[in-house]
Amino acid sequence: MKYYRKGIEVDPKYAASYFGIGRLFYDQKKFEEAGRYYMQAIGLDPKFGPAYVGLGFVFRDQKQYDEAIKYYRKAIELDPKHASAYYGFGTVSHAQGKRDEAIQNYEKAIELDPKYAPAYNGLGFILRDQKKYDEAIKYYERAMELDPKDALAYYGSGSVFYALGRRDEAMKNCKKAMELDPSIKGCW
């Protein structure tokens, strides 16, 4: 955080420094503080798309889906190639039970950035929910390949392996998920 604060000292009008601090607060689940810094970034640069995506995630994580969608749409309006905005929109659609819309957004995120692991996870979770386990595993494996520290990919694949009766693989992936993210307490 000190580097971002130093950046603000050097140039108090540099939106990316405020966004960086917002991101650090978001990662700590300090959503109010994150939102405040994202808003400061937008105030300095109303065309700074990543701050809108950040606000979308803040509102999504607080289950304020309409607000989240508003910010994802703004980010997409500013930059139609912003993969994480489509991913975020997909997560909200999925949470609202709009499966087809979620799939479209995840697929668009992958089209824009084929190395964006979270979108593969999103598709994996939808396929898991539909009991299309073999397809789900492929998406989780791709996410793990792209980001070997992606706890959600291990969590999702562990739950699928469990559903398939492949207990050893389930335990291995669940254990890895909990090692990577201690907030994960179990996979099934």
Image (tube, helix red, strand yellow):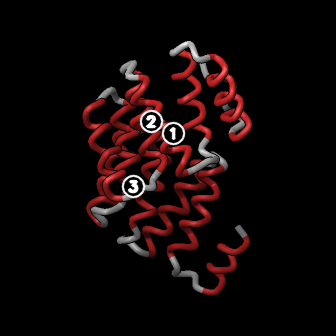
Element type at marker 3?
loop
Q: Are marks 1 and 3 in contact (CB under 8 Å)?
A: no
**Spatial separation of the CA atoms under disc 1 and disc 3:** 14 Å
Coordinates of residue 133 in the picture (x, y in percent): 43, 23
Coordinates of residue 65 in the picture (x, y in percent): 38, 38
Q: Earlier in the sequence, mark 3 or mark 2?
A: 3
* Three-letter amino acid code of the residue under disc 1: Glu
Asked if 149 appears above or below 23 in the picture, the reply is above
Question: Where does label 3 land, which residue?
Answer: 114
Residue 15 vs residue 96: left or right?
A: right
Element type at marker 1?
helix
Residue at 47%, 62% in the rendered image = 39
Residue 96 vs residue 171: left or right?
A: left
Position of the C terminus by quadrant:
top right
Q: Earlier in the sequence, mark 1 or mark 3?
A: 3
Asked if 13 appears above or below 133 in the picture, the reply is below
Residue 179 vs residue 67: left or right?
A: right
Question: Where does label 2 land, which residue?
Answer: 138
Which image quarter: residue 172? top right
**Spatial separation of the CA atoms under disc 3 and disc 2:** 14 Å
| Mark drawn on residue 4 | none
| Mark drawn on residue 141 | 1
* Three-letter amino acid code of the residue under disc 3: Pro
Q: Are marks 1 and 2 in contact (CB under 8 Å)?
A: yes
Residue at 38%, 38% in the rendered image = 92
* Three-letter amino acid code of the residue under disc 2: Lys
Which image quarter: residue 79? bottom left
Asked if 156 appears above or below 46 in the picture, the reply is above
**Spatial separation of the CA atoms under disc 1 and disc 2:** 5 Å
